[in-house]
């Protein structure tokens, strides 16, 4: 990775906005009401510990970046960040660790450590949330991410992405094109491909 780039003309031109030493960045999310507030999960390089790993936040459109997350070690990899509301933010990643901020990222509370391991993506809609990851990991929350429980979908392959597709409907995508669907907010799942 080379850092963060920004376009203000629908992708015609791009400008480097920093974080060059952070390595790979798997997830960037823009605040739902203020585009100057952006969170970046910096994964780093893949060959050892890296002090630049972590979650960064800008409040000035990328002019400056500050670490914004729980105290993380150079070994900790945070892979995803999502908004529940403009002030309620979840981050998750390596080791099944999940943290929540209810003050826009100023402070963080540990909320979950899944025994199933790596969390790759979070899907959120209102108070409903689903987390997916390696080895078929699925977690579900119905209280805005305050508490989580593991859900078994009957798959052992890694899950890469999840999204709410309607009232109570969640779709998860895994390796090799596998697709799962839930019609009850992530409580039960059916493999459709």
Image (spheres, grey):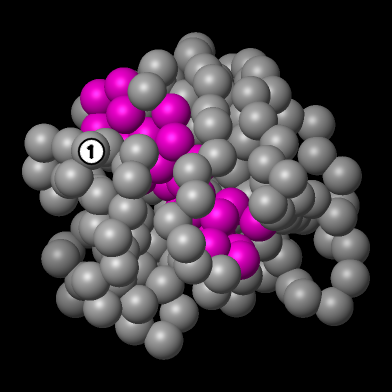
Please provide percent x and percent y for residue 172: 33, 60
Q: Nearer the viewer, residue 87 or 178?
A: 178
Q: So how many labels did they put on this image?
A: 1
Looking at the figure, which quarter contains the C terminus? bottom left
Is residue 136 found left or right of 179 in the rendered image?
A: right
**For mark 1, what is the residue?**
184
Quarter of the image holding residue 187? top left
Using the image, determine if residue 175 lies above or below residue 20: below
Q: Does the magenta stretch include residue 174?
A: no
Using the image, determine if residue 109 lies above or below residue 14: above
Q: Which residue is drawn at 32% across and 29% down?
A: 128
Q: Taking the image as drawn, is residue 69 in sight?
A: no
Please provide percent x and percent y for residue 85: 32, 22
Quarter of the image holding residue 22? bottom right
Is residue 160 found left or right of 44 in the rendered image?
A: left
Q: For the residue carrying disc 1, how many other residues have a C-alpha within 10 Å: few (<14), some (14-19), or many (20+)?
A: few
Please provide percent x and percent y for residue 186: 33, 42
Q: Residue at x 23, y 71 (%)?
A: 192
Please provide percent x and percent y for residue 125: 25, 33
Q: Which residue is drawn at 68% across and 52% down?
A: 116
Q: Does the magenta stretch include residue 132?
A: yes
Question: What residue range appears in magenta?
Answer: 118-141
Is residue 78 found left or right of 166 in the rendered image?
A: right
Among all residues in the image, which is located at the extreme top? Answer: 103
Looking at the figure, which quarter contains the N terminus? bottom right
């Amino acid at each position: 990775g080379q850092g963060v780039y920004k376009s203000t003309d629908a992708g015609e031109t791009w400008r480097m906005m920093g974080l060059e030493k952070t390595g790979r960045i798997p997830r960037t999310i823009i605040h739902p009401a203020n585009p100057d507030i952006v969170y970046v999960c910096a994964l780093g390089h893949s060959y050892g510990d890296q002090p630049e790993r972590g979650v960064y936040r800008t409040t000035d459109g990328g002019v400056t970046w500050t670490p914004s997350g729980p105290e993380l070690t150079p070994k900790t990899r945070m892979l995803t960040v999502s908004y529940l509301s403009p002030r309620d933010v979840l981050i998750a990643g390596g080791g099944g660790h999940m943290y929540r901020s209810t003050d826009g990222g100023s402070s963080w509370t540990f909320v979950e450590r899944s025994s199933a391991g790596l969390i790759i993506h979070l899907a959120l809609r209102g108070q409903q949330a689903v987390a997916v990851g390696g080895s078929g990991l699925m977690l579900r929350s119905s209280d805005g991410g305050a508490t989580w429980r593991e859900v078994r979908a009957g798959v052992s392959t890694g899950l890469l992405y999840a999204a709410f597709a309607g009232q109570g409907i969640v779709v998860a995508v895994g390796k090799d094109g596998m697709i799962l669907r839930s019609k009850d907010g992530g409580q039960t799942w059916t493999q459709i491909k």
